[in-house]
Amino acid sequence: MKTITLFNNKGGVGKTTLTWNLSVSLSSKGKSVLLIDFDPQCNLSIAVIGEKKFEKLFKHTTSEPYGRTIRAFCQPFIQQDTTPQVFTTSPQYPMDQGSGRLDIVPGDFWLNNLSDILSVGTDLIAGNAINRFLIPSLIADKVSAANNIEYDYVIIDVPPSFNSIVRSALYCSDYYLVPCTADVFSSYCIGLIGETLPIFNEDWTQGVKRSRNLSNNLISSKGQPKFAGWIFNGFDKRRNPGQSQATEIAADAAHRDKIKSSVEKHLIKRLKKSVSEYNAVPSFVSNEPVAKVEDLNVMAPDSILQSVPLKYLSRVKPTRGVLARGAWSAPQKTLMQNMSSEHDKLADYIINHLV
């Protein structure tokens, strides 16, 4: 069971939609996938299961005092007053026959509180309660036991931040992927990631040395997230006169090249130099993007609104804008198909390399 986090401290990079569509592609290839919505905004949960179904999960009962969201595990685990519970649900839109299992542990706005509760200084660095930073792994293990299934992949959705719940997800992850968009801030944020992750590693190493739970096998197996590459997301392409195929517009291509340079200089080289406890950058990783997903314009928000992933969006009518009473245009369907294929390529990359 490999755990992957799609992470960038910069917002607006399409992290949640990438997470969702990647999980669908992995499932379409017969893989069993568990999604953990560890983002207080809960956008992944709303997209996957629909807003109405998501709202019903917050109902508190005597047997389910914290509802049926991720809070049902997190709060009892932290307070140690009742037995932590795990609940999963399946996507609103059914996967095609032959697909692997796809489940999600729904998020909760209460995760904002968890971010404040987790103490980097006391729980982590001082070694007093490192297991608090392993909540996603504990959830994944408990879900596997409850559902009687060994998932091939656990994918964690996190907020655009460097806060404690992002640390928790990264400490629990075998790999992380970094989505970037074609803008001036993406290359800068790559540099911030390169500066910050070695500090996360130092804090974990100190905490493990001071931990009272040195015999804990889970602790000893975690805290070693590896950079698995970056994804170029949300760019525009155009076919110029004399070209047989469309290419990135000049401005977006310039941003792409700037991000490539930053990935090489400020992330890969910095991780290799600063992290000595393990191989933080596998040999198959380069500064080239591992996937390139174009801007989907009205299709992405419509996909979320209907809780239909991109792979199946052409099967339903659009609900937004001027197309609301009609159907998707041929160019839109072509773009859906091409970008769904790009998600499939990303899934193949993960299957072949993230072992």
Image (spheres, rainbow, N blue to C red):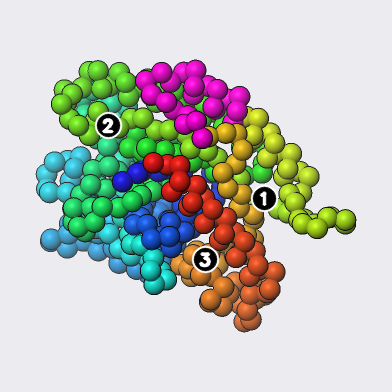
**Residue closest to the eye, 283 or 34:** 283
| Element marked by disc 2 | helix
Instruction: Determine whether, in the image, residue 355 is placed left or right of residue 238.
Output: left
Find residue 131 and report its image quarter: top left
**Res. 235 mark:** 1
Q: Is residue 327 visible?
A: yes
Q: Which amino acid type corresponds to the residue marked 2 in the rendered image?
A: Ser
Q: What stretch of residues is rendered in magenta? A: 263-284
Q: Which amino acid type corresponds to the residue marked 3 in the rendered image?
A: Lys
Residue count near mark 3 (Cα–Cα under 10 Å), binned few <14, some 14–19, many ≥20: many
- The residue to which callout 2 is attached is 221
Q: Reading the chain from its start, which is encountered first: label 2 or label 3? A: 2
**In magenta stretch: residue 63:** no
Image quadrant where one finds the C terminus: top left
Q: Is residue 305 visible?
A: no
Q: Which amino acid type corresponds to the residue marked 1 in the rendered image?
A: Phe
Q: Please tell me which residue is depicted at 39% across the width and 72% down the height of the picture.
A: 97
Q: Please tell me which residue is depicted at 41% across the width and 18% down the height of the picture.
A: 276
**Spatial CA span between label 2 and label 3:** 35 Å
- The residue to which callout 3 is attached is 311
Frontmost of labels 3 and 1 is 3
Residue count near mark 2 (Cα–Cα under 10 Å), binned few <14, some 14–19, many ≥20: few
| Element marked by disc 3 | helix
In the rendered image of this protein, does residue 351 appear above or below residue 8?
below
**In magenta stretch: residue 265:** yes
Determine whether label 2 and label 3 are within 8 Å by CB. Answer: no
Q: Please tell me which residue is depicted at 88% across the width and 56% down the height of the picture.
A: 242
